[in-house]
Amino acid sequence: MTDDLIARLSTDLKPVRRMAMARLLVGATLLSTVVAIVAMNMWLGMRPDMDSAMATMNFWTKFTYTLSVALLGGVATLALARPDGRTRWPWYIASALLALLVILAFYQLVRAEPDDVMPLIVGGTSMVCPWRIVVLGLPILFGAILALRRLAPRSPTLAGFAAGIMAGGAGAWVYSFACAETGMMFLALWYTLGIVIVGVIGAVLGRFLLRW
């Protein structure tokens, strides 16, 4: 009986394309990131001083931090999308990047004039920055969740959290082209908060939508 069942289940099996899981997740993420870019341009627009901003270290720090978090979240999501998936090193590297950013932020604050300290921390958009990142990250998160529903994550909640961190990092990266804030502590606090919020949303969605 068991042999017959196995034989029926294995009849007409088709080989899965190599890297099919990665292709599915990356494709969904890239497509939804394009949606976020279009939405950002229609909603906020590119910062008007982009040419001069690209000559500053602050711009490239923001660019590198957000993109790195998105990529590390993506690596973790790919690993956790498997039934036997588990990984730690992307979380360690992301934590180290945040620690390095905080060190650079304190160095910037120590060198700043007293009147410039608070603007470097709270800027002029601290109350809206995290929520803009959430709005731009949600399309990317939904794309990743739809892809993950076709896979079999070992821990739906953790896989959803990883997808949320990836989406939040990508949303923050998209938002960095519209944001004119120059404080590294602003980046460490408010950008990271927006990314983590998307991560929490991803964990909640994963818990209920990624069960199998």
Image (cartoon, rainbow, N blue to C red):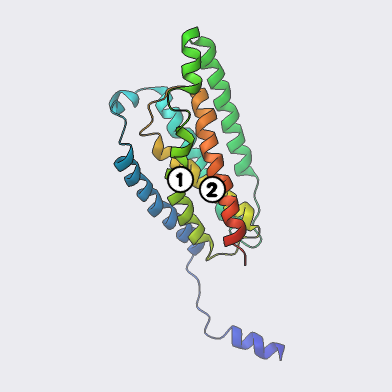
Position of residue 173 measured from the top left corner of the image (x, y, whole percent): 43, 38
Query: Could you say which quadrant of the image residue 205 lies in?
Result: bottom right
Residue 75 in sight: no
Q: Disc count in the image? A: 2
Three-letter residue code for mark 1: Gly
Which circle's residue, 1 or 2, is located before the other in the chain?
1
Q: Residue furthest front?
A: 127
Q: Quadrant of the C terminus?
A: bottom right
Q: Residue at x 45, y 30 (%)?
A: 62
Residue that carries the numbered disc 1 in the rendered image: 137
Q: Answer yes or no: do the residues labelled 1 and 2 have beta carbons within 8 Å?
A: yes
Three-letter residue code for mark 2: Gly
Q: Residue at x 54, y 16 (%)?
A: 107
Q: Residue at x 56, y 40 (%)?
A: 196
Q: Is residue 119 left or right of residue 204?
A: left
Q: Residue at x 54, y 51 (%)?
A: 163
Mark 2 neighbour density, 10 Å: few (under 14) some (14–19) many (20 or more): many
